[in-house]
Image (cartoon, rainbow, N blue to C red):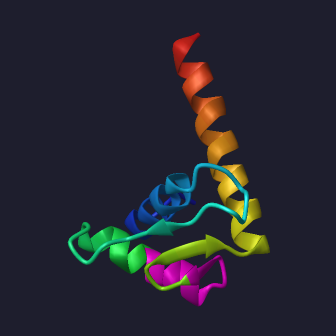
């Protein structure tokens, strides 16, 4: 099993959220890369974010973003070792 191009885009959108806090939102502009726009729509459809163009994290979205950030940090730390 491996990540798809769509999964990568979804992870990139989740990484745009600075924290898993529900107090900070994002906006994916119409001029953004089409893959990010589509990823945001999928994340909204899956109940991870509140708006099709970003908005705020839902509780499952907060958990997913936290995991995305943790995985990134773990991989980044491993690559520096």
64 up-or-down from 76: above or below: below
Reply above or below: 79 against 33.
above
Residue furthest out toward the left:
31
Q: Residue at x 66, y 84 (%)?
A: 47
Image quarter of residue 28? bottom left
The residue depicted at 35 percent of the width and 76 percent of the height is 37
Residue 81 is situated, as x and y percent measured from the top left of the image, at 59, 10
Q: Residue at x 49, y 55 (%)?
A: 16
Q: Residue 35's image quarter? A: bottom left
State the image coordinates of residue 50 (x, y, percent, origin top left).
61, 82
Vertical side of 30 occupied by 10: above or below:
above
* Residue 42 in the image, given as x and y percentages of width and height: 50, 82
Q: Splitting the image into 4 quarters, where does residue 25 fall?
A: bottom right
Q: Is residue 74 left or right of residue 6?
A: right
The residue sitting at 49% across, 74% down in the picture is 54
Q: Nearer the viewer, residue 7 or 39?
A: 39
Q: Which residues are magenta?
A: 40-50
**Quadrant assignment for the N terminus:** bottom right
User: Does the magenta run of residues contain 48?
Assistant: yes
């Amino acid at each position: 099993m491996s990540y798809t191009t769509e999964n990568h885009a979804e992870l990139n959108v989740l990484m745009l959220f600075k924290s898993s806090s529900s107090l900070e939102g994002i906006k994916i502009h119409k001029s953004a890369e089409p893959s990010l726009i589509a990823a945001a729509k999928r994340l909204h459809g899956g109940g991870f974010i509140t708006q099709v163009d970003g908005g705020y994290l839902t509780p499952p979205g907060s958990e997913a973003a936290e995991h995305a950030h943790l995985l990134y940090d773990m991989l980044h730390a491993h690559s520096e070792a």
